[in-house]
Amino acid sequence: MDTCRAPSALAQYRVLLMKDLRQEFRTKEMLVSMGIYALLVIVVFGVALSFARPGADFLEVSGGLLWALVVFTSLLGLNRSFSHETENGCLEGLLLAPLDRGVVFLAKATSNLVFLGIVEIIAVPLYWVFFSSFAAPAATAALIVVPLVLGSVGIAGIGTLLSTITAATRGKDVMLALLFVPIVFPLLYACVSATTAALVGGVLMEEAFATSLALAAGYDVIMLLASWVLYDFVVS
Amino acid sequence: MSAAPGTPAVPAIRCEGLTKAFGTRKAVDDLTFELPQGAFLSVFGPNGAGKTTLLRLLATLARPSAGSVAVNGVDLKEEPDRARASIGLISHNAMLYPDLTAEENLLLYARLYGVPEPERRVVELLDAVGLKHRRLDRVRTFSRGMTQRVSIARALVNDPAVVLLDEPYSGLDPHAIDIFDDLIGRVRDGRTFVMVSHDLEKGFRLADHVLVMARGRAVSFGSKDALDPEEFRALYRSTVGSGVA
Amino acid sequence: MAREGKTPRLPEAGQWPDKVAPAALVAGIVLTTVGFLMAFLTVPPVGGATVGGVELIGDAMVNQKMLLSQKIFYFHMPVAITSFVALIFGAYYSVRFLMTKSQRFDTCARIALELALLFVVMTMVTGEMWTRFEWGVWWSWEPRLTTYLILMLIVIAYFVLRSSIDEPERRATFAAVVAVIAAIDVPICFMITRLIPSSIHPVVLREGGMSPEMGLCVGLVALGMLCVCFALYRARFRQVRLCQRVDALKETLDDER
């Protein structure tokens, strides 16, 4: 019988990613809970804004609210994403294999990104449906896709590292929020700025959109690299 | 199928001054021993003696702070990935994803190890543990004993030369324990086994080598034949008795 | 357990810096006091900030008398510098820890961050006063303030994380990783809040340098604060290390029993 030959990192990455996706699409646990949670947050926003006067001013707030929605929903998902791995000691099972730890990180971050993306595809139009009566966004509104993508990449990356850390702590749900919110703050700031610029359009669009996106992209690159390097320490 | 044993001259496991410490607290302290190919080593000791840490070191889940440990002549610190390919671990944690089927779980691990013809290998293994008919069922629906059998198949998926057992009996009913022992007997196949267990009788029956640990150090190590059972029990009782701080 | 040549190394404390520490403490106290006296007695009010008559800043009327509040600056700035130095040391020791896995560096990092927390909180409090009197508002989402708030939250999270993990090595590793991430995050945070023009909150920063007297005064107090911080660090380090030493000795006794 042939001896095992360690497969390429790409093959292992694909195997790990497929495992996460298959598991999630079978149970739909995370997607359903994140989706419902997003809807509930929208309802709370509805109450919070029920006495606000509709008008163009709303556009300046709506980008921020949208990101509040994304952050809360992704926190929920990140907390869930690692419970599968710790439940049966599965993470140890993976670490027993001849497998670079960076691959584990990238696979997990990718699956988190996929789930977050799916939830955003549902939640963002929903948000628009509920609040479009307040004010009509500028023609550039479709460009909010760019900050959403950049933000989600960063959230999935740093969130994967942090949820791996907090999965092994007491009171992990609170712990994740406590670490995640301040650390992701700069990214959030940049994304809110870009989103607002896209929604409001005009002068703000010209002066803030590109800068904000460049900064968000910079954050993504730096934090993903840092997380990737530090992941080895976290899992062993 | 045969485990790939190294040349008989190379010990299956060789520890030299193996130490795992943090600050002054030493979980494993200056452990030195050699285990020949095909041996079955039982590790005994009170809680906190460092048995589990030793197993984690052997499984490359922890890195030694000092000393060296080699499996089939491959140093775990220098070439962890090469060593990992010839190590299997069965623990009280099943390490199986409950929402995947037995077959999917095993296929996942087989592909991570790069096993040739993974589909055939997985069916073979499930057949060997008597669960071929349940291979398309989710692991969540399995009993504890069945899960543990899949877990054995999982540990053997890469045809390891060294199999580590970490408290494999915990949570099993007597019937499941019998099946487990029987299975272990059938998959011996020239492989080397290291078992950590609280169950003195069981650990002693299966073993041909015995290591007693207390506070991270080896109190006694040797082949079982050289050991008088009564003397061993007395030794065990005295270490367990005084070891629990 | 006489194993030749391998006597277990006990945690040590009381190396040479401990001898310097009391002197540093005294020097720190003297320097800080001198600096304060200077701030109130000899340094004139900030050159560019003199208010002709009465002016509306924020929602408060400000006149020359209120500019006395800017003396907070002579406390605020040195404390901020000190907290920053403590943080840099914390991050440095965390990296060292990840490289060596030696408990000593974990202890160093932890204590550096404890002091950082102390000084960050002082910075926040004095900064608050400054904001209130200088700008007339309790809080402004201004880059420096925001960054410091985030910094404070991360340092607090660091200690909450530490307290929620029992296993010492894992605790040390996770804490070090968070400290490194924080060290990367904080400069980015400052940059991003600074570079993105916010339409709602105008950036309230006084550009322009300090007068030589001001610089001297701030320098003196900062030096004093750093000395005090160093003395505190050594005292705390000594205390923690000795505790660890006692634990280690207890264990050795257990072993010999």
Image: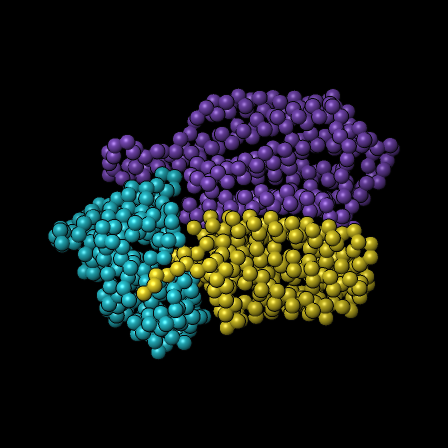
Q: Residue furthest front?
A: A2
Colouring chosen for the image of the structure? by chain
Relative to residue C229, is residue C107 drawn left or right?
left
| Residue A166 visible in rendering | no
Q: Is residue B56 above or below residue C241?
A: below
Spot occupied by residue C14 in the image (x, y as percentages of width and height): 43, 27
The colour chain C appears in is: purple
Q: Nearer the viewer, residue B208 or A4?
A: A4
Q: Which lettered chain is shown in yellow?
A: A
Q: Report the residue at 29% width, 33% height from top.
A: C6
Relative to residue A225, is residue A67 drawn left or right?
right
Q: Report the residue at 24% width, 48% height from top.
A: B34
Q: Quadrant of the C terminus of chain B?
A: top left
Q: Which lettered chain is shown in cyan?
A: B
Q: Report the residue at 33% width, 70% height from top.
A: B125
Relative to residue C2, is residue A138 drawn left or right?
right
Q: Residue furthest right?
A: C53
Q: Report the residue at 79% width, 54% height from top.
A: A206
